[in-house]
């Protein structure tokens, strides 16, 4: 989440102090990104591009649409604070929201 989003939370001091904790994670945005990269791109000819956010450590905020994912790429690695299964005990509420109840990422 952006620093502005953390500041808008009910307890912004705690939100900033605990940035990266499960309640500051946005599983819906991750799920939408995963669905976009898994979906057929369709259309005729040429490379298709999907954009993903990055994180700028200098400004301490995400940068929307900073990473270009080409339709020719066959392997993607999603990196961040929330580990993928088999470690759902770390953030048990995150992965059901990202993957669907009882499902992993394929």
Image (tube, rainbow, N blue to C red):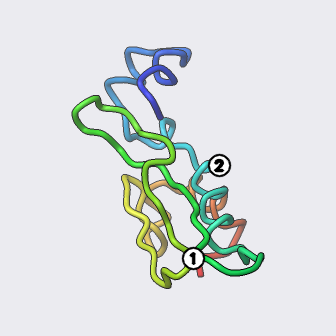
Q: Residue at x 45, y 75 (%)?
A: 76
Q: Residue at x 48, y 54 (%)?
A: 91
The residue closer to the viewer here, 65 or 14, is 65
Q: Which residue is mark 2?
A: 28
Q: Residue at x 46, y 68 (%)?
A: 84
Label 1: how many residues lie within 10 Å, few (<14), some (14-19) or many (20+)? Answer: some
Q: How many marks?
A: 2
| Quadrant assignment for the C terminus | bottom right
Is 80 placed left or right of 7 in the picture? Answer: left
Label 2: how many residues lie within 10 Å, few (<14), some (14-19) or many (20+)? Answer: few
Q: Secondary structure at mark 2?
A: helix
Q: Which residue is mark 1?
A: 71
Q: Secondary structure at mark 1?
A: loop
Q: Nearer the viewer, mark 2 or mark 1?
A: 1
Image coords of residue 77 (percent x, y): 41, 72
Image coords of residue 60 (percent x, y): 30, 31
Is 26 placed left or right of 99 in the picture? Answer: left
Image coords of residue 68 (percent x, y): 47, 60
Is 98 placed left or right of 20 in the picture? Answer: right
Q: Is residue 45 above or below residue 21?
A: below
- Residue placed furthest toward the right: 43
């Amino acid at each position: 989440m952006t620093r502005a989003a953390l500041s808008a939370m009910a307890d912004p001091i705690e939100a900033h102090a605990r940035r990266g904790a499960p309640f500051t994670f946005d599983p819906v945005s991750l799920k939408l990104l995963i669905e976009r990269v898994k979906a057929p791109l369709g259309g005729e000819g040429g490379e298709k591009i999907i954009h993903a956010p990055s994180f700028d450590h200098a400004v301490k905020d995400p940068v929307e649409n900073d990473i270009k994912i080409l339709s020719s790429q066959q392997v993607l690695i999603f990196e961040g604070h929330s580990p993928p299964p088999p470690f759902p005990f770390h953030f048990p509420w995150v992965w059901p929201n990202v993957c669907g109840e009882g499902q992993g990422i394929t």
